[in-house]
Image (cartoon, rainbow, N blue to C red):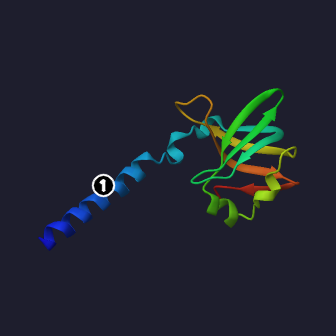
Amino acid sequence: MRIIAITLAAAFSCAAISGAAWAHHGWTSYDASKQTKITGTITALKWEMPHPLLSVDSKGKKYDLQLPHIQRIIDRGLAREALSNGKTVMVEAQPHKEKADDWQVVAITVDNYEYSMTR
């Protein structure tokens, strides 16, 4: 009976882990050939797991930009406080291949300093 319980627990754990991995999109979902520079004003920041969302107004158009995982942002030296409302930023982002309003941030320049999120 104990072996069956251990086997079932292991099977459920593997299923849960694979489901989370399958749901995560990765960099291949974005079109690197259409990378764009967007300069604008920060209007909102949702600092949440797994990816913070930065809203930028550029020439009257709103962009919702998906930032990398929080730990990557911190490792690159970009503090949450640097992304406050009203600041001007220049973002290099790649559009999603299938979702029109989904952008992945590759680099962000704020306070005259560029933070690379991929290099």
Furthest-bottom residue in this view:
2
Furthest-left residue in this view:
1
Residue at (63% x, 52% y) in the render: 48
The part of the image, by quadrant, that contains residue 13 is: bottom left
Residue at (74% x, 40% y) in the render: 55
x, y percent for residue 1: 11, 70
The part of the image, by quadrant, that contains residue 57 is: top right
Image vertical order of residue 4 relative to residue 50, above or below? below
Query: Which class describes the residues within 10 Å of circle 1: few (<14), some (14-19), or many (20+)?
Result: few
x, y percent for residue 109: 80, 51
Q: Nearer the viewer, residue 54 or 119?
A: 54
Would residue 22 appear left or right of 66 to someone viewing this image? Answer: left
Residue type at mark 1: give it. Ala
Residue at (88% x, 54% y) in the render: 112
Q: Nearer the viewer, residue 115 or 4?
A: 4
Image vertical order of residue 15 relative to residue 25, above or below? below
Q: How many marks?
A: 1
x, y percent for residue 16: 35, 55
Q: Secondary structure at mark 1?
A: helix
Image vertical order of residue 74 relative to residue 67, above or below? below
Q: Which residue is mark 1?
A: 15
Would residue 86 appear left or right of 68 to someone viewing this image? Answer: right
x, y percent for residue 96: 57, 35
Quadrant (top left/top right/bottom left/bottom right) for the C terminus = bottom right
Would residue 62 appear left or right of 86 to someone viewing this image? Answer: left
Residue at (79% x, 52% y) in the render: 83
